[in-house]
Image: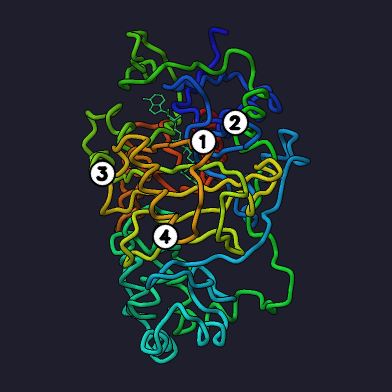
């Protein structure tokens, strides 16, 4: 074992796990003299992926939907033998709550942007003036070319405030849990900028590039999940790792570069040596481990928002006024504190026993972060009151599960890509063999994290082989 090089992965969320898994596959296939260790601070693997089974319900505390067009996650699912467990979303209507009522999301919208004109024209979600403003996208000049701008600035210029606030903002802040007037266009949806620059209009650009679908066509399944919850992917990957790879309940506090490689100071005082490192923790933790390097300070200054969600389990009979659909988003102009609610029993019927209902509601708007620090009872009350204004629930839930994700949602603010390029450049120069991957850096969906894990594998192998 003496000549073996040691690769250490810090963090056992899906990024760290996929890195470890694909590294060991390469090491085995090419009989490479490397060992892999994964160090995880908490008592369990999975990070934000966390499924709970309770009274016959499958409750996701974190992610529940895998974007069907992103390949890496389905490749991983296949590689670990879970393909049979895939379930497609039960398609249904989705709504936005705005101006005191629910409005169906217009057919043919892509991330809130119209790809067909007539569903928008007839939608009750926008006023005539709002629709007229949105039509400006066809006439307006391209925005002057910029390195970056906020999502809000870009979409407000093209489609007007109303379409942004009643549709685009609730959809995008649902994904990023942030303020679209601060989030970077180029780090989130650079394709919209390209469409505008190439076609002079994002609506025209989308019409040309998104396949047309009639209202009567069966909706393709946009999302998939795993029958027993996404934690089953975590367990299946863990099972494939060689014995002794994972070390739980161990945090890395500090990293020093020495002549014989990197020395990782663990929270129990022990020192772990590594020849190459993949840091997959949130950005502010990565910065703290390497706080002697000023070039990482932008990670310290990068904001992260907190969210909480509440899963509420009911008997079906509790729902007096049901809604035909799989959930709704809430416009930022409304005075509701919930930001979205999924009717999980309709979106994913396999999660809920017969005769029961399961809903999951979110709180934690960028300007309502304090809500996450309230007690479970207070958060449930807030959710209960808001839901009751919309759908009449005649008795309290059988049980509820509250989950807080503090500082979990990294905010890719304007200039994020440039800052990351600067950091990557300095890492290469000053800390060769150290790589950053995960939700804080280059995409925060589960598939994006797996992509980053795969890239990290290539980087580590290239570094160690040269
Ligand atoms: P994490 O899961 O955060 O893992 C990082 C790990 O590092 C953690 O386990 C942590 O304990 C560990 N760690 C931290 N510090 C240290 C240290 N010092 N030493 C050792 N270990 C350390 N994505 C989707 O694609 N679809 C969805 O439907 C979706 N919904 C979401 C809903 C919610 C409520 C949330 C919170 C996220 C959602 N996401 C969704 C996003 C997605 O789940 C995450 O971006 C992704 O799981 C992050 O994985 P990661 O491995 O990069 O980070």
Where is residue 40? Give x, y as percent: 46, 22
Label 1: how many Cα within 10 Å (few below 14, some 14–19, many 20+): few
Where is residue 460? Give x, y as percent: 51, 32
Disc 3 CB within 8 Å of nearest ligand 1 atom: no
Earlier along the polypeptide chain: callout 4 or callout 3? 3
Which callout, 4 or 3, points to the residue nearer the camera?
4
Residue 345 vertical position relative to residue 247 in the rendered view, above or below:
below
Residue furthest out toward the right: 84
Give the structural element (helix, strand or loop) at label 4: helix
The answer to whether 149 appears left or right of 81 in the picture is: left
Say the numbered circle drawn on residue 389: 4
Question: What residue is shown with label 1?
Answer: 399
Disc 1 CB within 8 Å of nearest ligand 1 atom: no
Question: What residue is shown with label 2?
Answer: 54
Q: Nearer the viewer, residue 367 or 246?
A: 367
Q: Nearer the viewer, residue 296 or 276?
A: 296
The answer to whether 350 appears left or right of 457 in the picture is: right
Residue 149 vertical position relative to residue 83 in the rendered view, above or below:
below
């Amino acid at each position: 074992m003496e000549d073996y090089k040691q690769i250490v992965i810090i963090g056992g969320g899906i990024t760290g796990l996929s890195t470890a898994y694909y590294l060991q596959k390469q090491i085995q296939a090419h009989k490479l003299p490397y060992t892999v260790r994964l160090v995880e601070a908490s008592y369990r693997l999975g990070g934000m992926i966390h499924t709970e089974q309770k009274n016959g319900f499958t409750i996701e505390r974190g992610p529940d939907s895998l974007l069907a067009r992103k390949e890496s996650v389905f490749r991983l699912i296949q590689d670990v033998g879970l393909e049979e467990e895939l379930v497609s979303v039960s398609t249904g209507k989705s709504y936005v709550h705005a101006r005191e009522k629910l409005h169906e999301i217009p057919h043919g919208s892509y991330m809130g942007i119209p790809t067909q004109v007539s569903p928008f024209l007839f939608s009750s979600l926008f006023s005539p003036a709002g629709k007229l403003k949105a039509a400006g996208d066809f006439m307006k000049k391209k925005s002057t070319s910029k390195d970056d701008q906020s999502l809000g600035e870009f979409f407000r210029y093209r489609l007007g405030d109303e379409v942004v606030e009643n549709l685009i903002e609730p959809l995008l802040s649902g994904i990023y849990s942030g303020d679209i007037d601060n989030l970077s266009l180029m780090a989130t949806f650079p394709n919209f900028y390209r469409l505008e620059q190439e076609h002079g209009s994002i609506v025209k650009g989308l019409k040309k590039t998104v396949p047309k679908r009639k209202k009567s066509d069966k909706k393709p399944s946009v999302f998939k999940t795993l029958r027993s919850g996404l934690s089953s992917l975590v367990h299946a990957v863990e099972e494939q790792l060689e014995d002794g790879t994972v070390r739980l309940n161990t945090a890395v506090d500090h990293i020093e570069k020495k002549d014989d490689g990197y020395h990782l100071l663990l929270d129990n005082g022990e020192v772990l040596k590594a020849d190459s490192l993949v840091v997959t923790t949130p950005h502010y933790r990565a910065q703290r481990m390497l706080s002697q390097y000023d070039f990482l300070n932008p990670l310290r200054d990068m904001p992260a928002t907190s969210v909480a969600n509440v899963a509420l389990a009911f008997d079906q009979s509790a729902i007096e006024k049901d809604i035909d659909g799989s959930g709704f988003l809430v416009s930022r102009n409304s005075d509701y504190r919930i930001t979205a609610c999924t009717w999980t029993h309709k979106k994913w019927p396999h999660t809920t026993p017969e005769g029961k209902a399961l809903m999951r509601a979110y709180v934690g708007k960028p300007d309502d972060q304090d809500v996450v620090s309230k007690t479970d009872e207070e958060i449930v009350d807030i959710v209960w009151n808001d839901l009751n204004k919309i759908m009449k629930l005649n008795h309290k839930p059988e049980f509820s599960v509250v989950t807080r994700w503090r500082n979990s949602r990294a905010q890719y603010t304007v200039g994020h890509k440039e800052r990351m390029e600067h950091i990557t450049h300095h890492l290469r120069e000053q800390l060769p063999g150290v790589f950053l991957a995960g939700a804080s850096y280059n995409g925060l969906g589960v598939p994006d994290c797996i992509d980053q894990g795969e890239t990290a594998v290539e980087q580590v192998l290239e570094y160690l082989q040269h």
